[in-house]
């Protein structure tokens, strides 16, 4: 094998529609000069997303972090919220910006989602909600979380940044909880360059969300709440409409990539791969593996660095844990002993390149490179 490849493999690469199709929509936007404030593309994308995702109400946002921040405001969440340390830091930041204290719960060994069996022990009189994350698009234990929330009267907001299009038992995973929040960042399987959305189950809640994302305006002269400016613009929405057309095709191509990785890596001692889960229709947004350094003979970090020499740029999602960052490590729930599984997984996980343009030959090169590095 040559020392490196001419191609560069990144953990993800955005899918984009044909430029000429996007240009036609841009020309229309230029002609109308309507760039934002609930224009026709914004309205159409909300309708099309509801139809595609099988949900009742969708509110578009400029990005997923703003969507999550507003979701907490919309449900008037205060006090303490139980969440996971194994996520992108925006999950906790949205709580912080709302003056809410995150309470970190350890994760499940098999799914890497918040361990529903540990949630109840963390509930205090200050607890008002649970904020789980469908990590890598793998569905949380929604039934157990719903049971706990019903007993204690807690709200549930799902961080579904990874879960666009994911179904369980034929039903959208976004239909669980009080709200679900999506990210349409460039790294996501469905992107609008930047963007996000809140999925609501009832019309009144969507209306409050729409007020909050537009400064609290109910009409031209009435401000009903201290909202912010979090609206998606027409250019983002137009891009999203085109992205939705080819989403299923891209999903099938990513599935082929994921299946190829799994078939090649299953024989490697010291590398754990994940299954899709029973009755789950996945979106193949990430391909995580876990490195057992004792069995593989090499640490995760050493493999991560060596792969760069061959232009293979993996990511350690999610390392470090949110609970280890200065803003959060002083919290009692951030203590290392409280999060043994999350701390161990954070030092083992490595996400391999996966995107719709990746070919089987590329996957074979990546896996072959891993095997040669570790001497398999």
Image: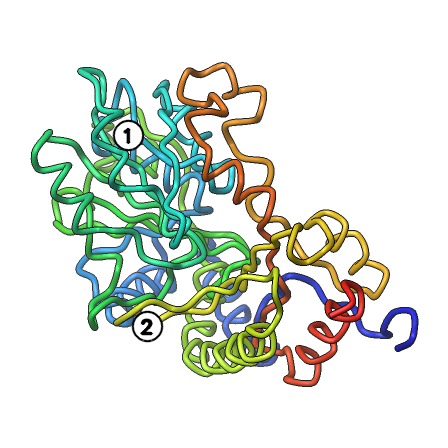
Report x, y in % for residue 131.
31, 37
Left or right of 338? Residue 59 is: left
Left or right of 238? Residue 181 is: left
Residue 206 appearing in the image: yes
| Mark whose residue sits in front, 1 or 2 | 2
The relative height of residue 67 versus residue 237 in the rendered view (above or below) is: above
Report x, y in % for residue 42.
36, 59
Quadrant, the N terminus = bottom right
Q: Mark 1 points at which residue?
A: 73
Q: Residue at x 21, y 32 (%)?
A: 75
Q: Residue at x 42, y 51 (%)?
A: 135
Q: Which residue is drawn at 52% across and 54% down?
A: 185
Q: Residue 319 carries which label?
A: none
Q: Mark 2 points at which residue?
A: 281
Residue 16 appearing in the image: no
Left or right of 16? Residue 132 is: left
The quadrant where residue 350 appears = bottom right
């Amino acid at each position: 094998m040559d020392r490196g490849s001419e191609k560069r493999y990144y953990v993800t690469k955005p899918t984009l529609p044909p430029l000429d199709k996007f240009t036609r929509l841009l020309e229309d936007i230029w002609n109308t000069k309507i760039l934002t404030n609930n224009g026709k593309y914004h309205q159409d994308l909300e309708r099309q997303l509801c139809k595609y995702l099988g949900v009742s109400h969708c509110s578009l946002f400029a990005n997923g972090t703003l969507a999550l921040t507003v979701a907490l405001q919309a449900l008037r969440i205060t006090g303490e919220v139980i969440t996971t340390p194994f996520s992108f830091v925006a999950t906790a930041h949205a709580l912080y910006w709302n003056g809410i204290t995150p309470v970190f719960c350890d994760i499940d060994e098999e799914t890497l989602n918040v361990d529903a069996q540990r949630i109840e022990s963390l509930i205090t009189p200050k607890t008002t909600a649970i904020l789980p994350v469908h990590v890598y698009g793998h569905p949380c234990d929604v039934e157990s979380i719903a049971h706990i929330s019903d007993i204690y009267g807690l709200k549930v907001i799902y961080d579904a940044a990874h879960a666009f299009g994911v179904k369980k038992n034929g039903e959208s995973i976004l239909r669980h909880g009080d709200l679900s929040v999506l990210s349409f960042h460039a790294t996501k399987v469905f992107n609008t360059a930047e963007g996000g959305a809140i999925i609501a189950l009832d019309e009144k809640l969507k209306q409050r969300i729409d007020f909050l994302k537009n400064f609290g305006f109910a009409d031209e002269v009435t401000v009903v709440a201290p909202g912010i400016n979090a609206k998606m613009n027409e250019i983002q929405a137009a891009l999203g409409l085109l992205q939705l057309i080819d989403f299923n095709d891209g999903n099938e191509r990513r599935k082929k990539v994921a299946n190829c990785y799994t078939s090649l890596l299953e024989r490697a001692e010291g590398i754990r791969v994940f299954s899709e889960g029973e009755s789950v229709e996945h979106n193949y947004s990430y391909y995580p593996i876990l490195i057992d350094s004792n069995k593989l003979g090499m640490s995760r970090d050493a493999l991560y660095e060596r792969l760069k020499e061959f232009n293979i740029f993996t990511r350690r999602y999610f390392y470090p844990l949110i609970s280890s960052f200065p803003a959060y490590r002083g919290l009692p729930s951030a203590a290392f002993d409280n999060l043994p599984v999350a701390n161990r997984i954070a030092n083992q996980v490595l996400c391999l390149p996966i995107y719709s343009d990746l070919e089987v030959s590329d996957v074979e090169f990546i896996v072959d490179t891993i095997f040669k590095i570790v001497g398999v």
